[in-house]
Each structure stands twice: as C-alpha cells, then as structure tokens.
Amino acid sequence: MGWEFEEAGRFGSEKAADEYARRNNIDPRDVHIARKGDEVELSIRRSALDGRNLRDNGEGRRDGWG
C-alpha cells in the first residue's frame, strides 16, 4: 500500500520547496519534491498534515495559496 500525498504547491527550486517544508516542521521523510519543467512540485504525506495550518509567506512559491 502506498502513501497518499497532498500537493502543497509549486516552487522555483528544490531549495525553496525544502525550506517551506522545514519552516512548517514537516519531517523530510514526509515530503516528495519533483521537478516539473522549470518548476518544482512539493507534495506532503497526508498523515503528516493532520489538520495543521501550514504557514506560507510566499517566498519561492510559484502558485497561489489554495
């Protein structure tokens, strides 16, 4: 059985996506970062979110907050 991930946004670099996850105290084992053309897509394991509100200051983000 695979883990279910929730899309957390698109970023300009792997570093920006990683920093976003770290600012929100997400364990690195619970994130998936994938390059999609000139952007990076960040997904977070659903069980790691547990209803938490993620802080978003928009740094490095390429999409709106949804």
Image (tube, rainbow, N blue to C red):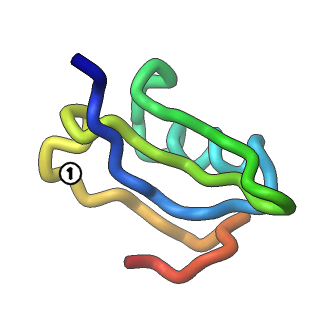
Looking at the image, the residue that sits furthest to the front is 1
Front-most of residues 55 and 41: 41
Q: Please rate how many residues cluster around mark 1, counting C-alpha atoms within 10 Å: few if below 14, some from 14 to 19, many from 20.
A: few
**Which residue matches tag 1?**
52
- 1 sits left or right of 24 in the view: left
27 versus 62 height, above or below: above
- 47 sits left or right of 6 in the view: left
29 versus 48 height, above or below: above
Q: Residue at x 75, y 46 (%)?
A: 35
Report the quarter where the N terminus lies: top left
- 13 sits left or right of 5 in the view: right
Quadrant in which residue 5 is drawn: top left
42 versus 59 height, above or below: above
Report the quarter where the C terminus lies: bottom left
Q: Residue at x 40, y 34 (%)?
A: 26
Q: Amino acid at mark 1?
A: Arg
Question: Horizontal and vertical percent for residue 9?
Answer: 53, 62
Kind of element beneath mark 1: loop
Front-most of residues 43 and 27: 43
Question: Horizontal and vertical percent for residue 41?
Answer: 61, 53
Q: Residue at x 50, y 24 (%)?
A: 28
Question: Horizontal and vertical percent for residue 7?
Answer: 42, 55
Quadrant in which residue 60 is drawn: bottom right
